Image: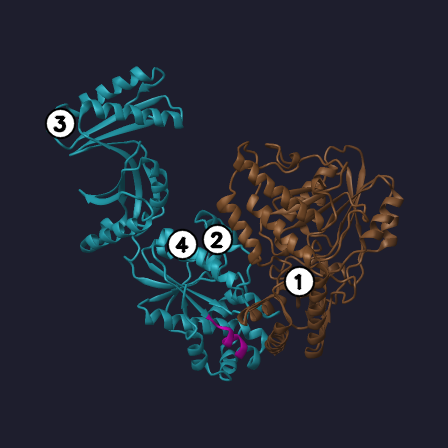
Amino acid sequence: MYNIVAVSFGEIFLKGKNRGSFEHKLIEQVKFALKEFKDIVVYKELGKMFIETSHEEDMDSILEKTRKIFGIVAISPSIKTETDPETMTLKAIELFKYLKDKKNFKTFKINTKRGDKKFPIGSMDFSAAVGGRILEHFPDVTVDVHNPEVEINIDIKKHCFISSEKIKTAGGLPIGSSGRALLLLSGGIDSPVAGHMIAKRGVEINALYFHTYPFTSERANEKVKHLKEILEEYCGNIKLYSINILEVHKAIKEFCREEETTILARRFMMRIAERIASNNNMDMLITGESLGQVASQTMKSMAVIEEAIQMPILKPLIGMDKTEIMERAREINTFETSILPYDDCCSVFAPKHPLINPKLESIKNSESKLDIEQLIEMAISTIEIL
Amino acid sequence: MEVYLDNSATTRVRQEVMDEVTDVNLNCYGNPSSIHRMGLKTEKRIEDARKHVAKIINAKADEIFFTGSGTESNNIALLGHISGIEGKINVVTTNIEHPSVYNVLKHFKDNVEIRYLDTDNLGRVNLEQLENLIDESTYLVSIMHVNNELGIVQNLSEICKISKNKNKNTKIHVDAVQSYGKIKIDVNKIPADTISFSSHKIHGPKGVGGLFIRSGVKISPIIFGGGQEKNIRPGTENTPGIVGFGKACQIVYENFEEETCRLRNLKNLYAKRLTEEIKDMKINSSLSEDGAPHILNVSFKHVRGEVLVHFLEMKGVYVSTGSACSSRSKSNRILEAIKLDPDYVDGTIRISLGHFNNEDEVEYVVESIKQSVEEIRKIMKL
């Protein structure tokens, strides 16, 4: 029945001179998200975006994909038709029946907006005429102009658009409108949620995954790749870098104290991430840390870890409880993949008693036994794009 | 060099088998239930395969039923034996069964008590305990002939004798997925009521299992449909798979003694060379007659099995872990049952041999394992 979606932009309107380029980005983003569908036209007209399809059966999936795109606040699935009064009336009745089958309601109202004054019937008269025809078909409903349960909107322009439902969508800003950042993606529950939250504010995300193959499985790569693909439904194209830090872990194990392993390894990860981000035009890092969740996420630990780099780190989950994060992960559909049981980087080399109160001095002292630059370079030389 | 040593997981299909599979797919694709000539031609191919499959265990062709897998055969047999029984009964089994038996038995309702036999450090069941556990309400004894992880061979004839002597009405099911085509089974000498087996463990195609049901034994169907396989496993027959299975059986039958002897020598050679080359290692499989010819389970101290698997895959050597410790929550039920020293449990791998393995690979594999174990120990022990 529906053959077009009218898309309402969100905060882009606030962005003044840049609005044109944001809208352009958003159109590109929509096209990317809907690339699997045949015969789709995405266009802008009179301050609104429209997604038109010649395959009505695709509409549910198109709505599902579109509602995940950041920068869109609402979508209205609509019927686009010629401005012929009889055709318009029949389509309105068809829509009415569809809505009635979905949910039984008693009162309704027709709103006609006549943007094209060449249309021969006045707005009020046309609403009354269509309402009358509906009452003939559905004897159990009545018109209520003040507080109707259902409204049918007939918008007459060059074409006529008939709609009723308005679906609230992801909100946020179009991807790319706020810059670029590198997400440290571990394969766990938290980091995909962190990426999603930052992407919502218009940040183009790329991701970095650390592994210790052959101490971890190649299947773990597949898991991270799958998480990336789920995130791409919201964030657009994501470049996923993968880096083997086994040599770093070996060096730490050989020269440093076991309980410092996590802090030292994470300092290396930050250094490597910073380098990859700045070499690829990204301005910040994103991590899934939540205060106090594990030993490396205490105030002290985070302070010592971050001291290793200059680049700012965004931690959108910092004040969230694990249960809240899990709930978010379920909402964005990454949870089931995140809990698959392949070893991630942390578990094989994790110390039995990690420090929760590390001293920067002593960590720096341990690092002085390592050739930091060489280890970073060795790690970066293993880079792969998954 | 690529050396595939995970033949207990599954095997590479032989070329001769593949030729048959292709021929059926291209030239004999009719539905055996169709009454036209093409259907009949297909049906004949299936019946021919059934004879080859039966021959391996000296059964009659009409005692063989084709299924979709070994797991399916075990399910059909166990559920089929037990279904419809209301009163209190018990089932005697071992603590080292494959999940396709273990989990089916666990699934039964409260009126079915499951009694588990203990095993010794090689996985052999305690025959005295068997005699004690069986009583007048023992409805079924379910025994795995060869354990998939350890390769231990249970003494089937003794087990059957004890069971039937203690209670002549007790039914016996044998899970022979790992032994079929590797160890002689003669259904005229062993009074098992049902025996399950699978095609892809003996270089046949995947997706075909078999179930022997002794003439006169009643199995209630658990799947309903168009009456194929005498209602035991309805559904359009997987003709290419079945014919391929038949061909694989024919080849196994023709070279039986020779091939099992060859595999046993190869297994012993691996055991000898690994013992010579690597310290702090344990062979968990029996090297005598009660060890299957193709399965060698070994443990290394201070090594993690799944890490060793990844080290070996880099060298083109494919083995599997005996232990399921990659998902830390699960402990290994089988290694626990044989009370393996906890220091060794995590470092367990299974080497399983097949037709395509030979002596030329041994030195390369042993050297690869040695190097990998040393490297892993160096890193883990640092």
Query: Dot 1 lies on which element?
Result: loop
Query: Dot 3 lies on which element?
Result: loop
Give the camera-side residue of B341 and A39: A39
Residue on which disc 3 sits: A119
Residue on which disc 2 sits: A325
Question: What mark, if any, has residue A231 been given in the picture?
Answer: 4
Q: Quadrant of the C terminus of chain B?
A: bottom right
Residue on which disc 1 sits: B322
Are the numbered discs 1 and 3 placed on the same chain, yes or no?
A: no
Quadrant in the picture for residue A48 = top left
> What colour is chain A?
cyan
Give the camera-side residue of B313 and B34: B34
- Circle 2 residues within 10 Å: few <14, some 14–19, many ≥20: many
At 36% from the left and 51% from the top, the residue drawn is: A234
Mark closer to the chain start, 3 or 2: 3
The answer to whether marks 3 and 4 mark residues whose Cβ atoms lie closer than 8 Å is: no
Query: Disc 2 and disc 1: Cα gap in Å?
Result: 36 Å
> What colour is chain B?
brown
Q: Residue furthest left?
A: A118
Query: Disc 4 and disc 2: Cα gap in Å?
Result: 15 Å
